[in-house]
Image (spheres, rainbow, N blue to C red):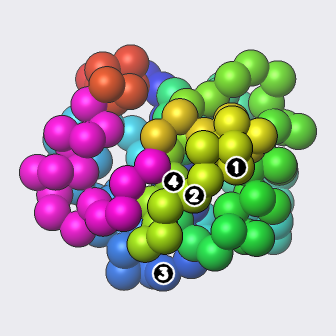
């Protein structure tokens, strides 16, 4: 089973995403940022999906670390109130963007195209 990595500085939102994915049979790990994580935190196998929420500069730092740590493309979904430019998404290898995943049904529906790879 592939890991879904949730990167979100807001503890409540991060727990919401992780809990809802686990309840639905997915393996999910979370961190507020990757910049301060020990190497033991990083999944040994490449995550099947990364969901990231935060400021653009923090997302760039975390996405950059993902690209350095894993040598294969990882689907990255950005959650932000402001739509990132298509150029920014292309440069950082972002697969999709949404402005809101606060409804648990919408969360799973939106992520379903990537979750099929990481489900039980």
> Does residue 113 lie above or below 61 as drawn?
above
Could one spot residue 101 in this view of the protein? yes
* Callout in the foreground (3, 2): 2
SS label for mark 1: helix
Question: Which of the two discs, 1 and 4, labels the residue nearer the N terminus?
Answer: 4
Label 2 Cα crowd, 10 Å radius (few <14 / some 14-19 / many 20+)? some
Which of 98/3 is in front? 98
Q: Are marks 2 and 4 in contact (CB under 8 Å)?
A: yes
x and y percent of residue 27 in the render? 39, 39
Query: From this viewpoint, which residue is outermost toward the right?
Result: 68
State the residue at coordinates (68%, 62%). Answer: 59
Which residue was labeled with disc 1?
88
Q: Is residue 109 magenta?
A: yes
Which numbered disc covers residue 78?
Answer: 4
| Comes first in the chain, label 3 or label 1 | 3
What x and y, as percent, mark residue 86?
60, 44
Residue at the image point whose x is 51% and y is 53% from the top: 78
- Upstream in sequence: badge 3 or badge 2: 3
- Disc 3 packing (10 Å; few <14; some 14–19; many ≥20): few
- In whole angstroms, how far apart are the C-alphas of marks 1 and 4? 11 Å
The part of the chain drawn in magenta is: 97-112
Of callouts 4 and 3, which one flags the residue occurring earlier in the amino acid sequence? Answer: 3
- As helix, strand or loop, the secondary structure at mark 3 comes to loop
Q: Is residue 5 or residue 80 the one in the foreground?
A: 80
| For residue 85, side relative to residue 23 (left or right) | right
> Up-down: is 88 above or below 111?
below
**How many circles with numbers are drawn on the protein?**
4
Secondary structure beneath dot 2 equals loop
- Residue that carries the numbered disc 2 in the rendered image: 84
Residue drawn at (83%, 49%) of the image: 65
């Amino acid at each position: 089973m592939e890991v879904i990595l949730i990167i979100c500085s807001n503890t409540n939102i991060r727990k919401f995403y992780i809990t809802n994915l686990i309840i639905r049979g997915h393996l999910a790990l979370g961190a507020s940022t990757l910049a301060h994580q020990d190497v033991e935190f990083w999944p040994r196998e490449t995550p099947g999906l990364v969901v990231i929420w935060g400021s653009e500069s923090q997302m760039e730092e975390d996405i950059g670390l993902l690209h350095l740590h894993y040598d294969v493309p990882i689907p990255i979904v950005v959650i932000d109130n402001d739509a990132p430019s298509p150029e920014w998404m292309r440069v950082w290898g972002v697969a999709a963007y949404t402005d809101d995943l606060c409804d648990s049904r919408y969360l799973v529906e939106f992520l379903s195209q990537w979750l099929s790879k990481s489900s039980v």
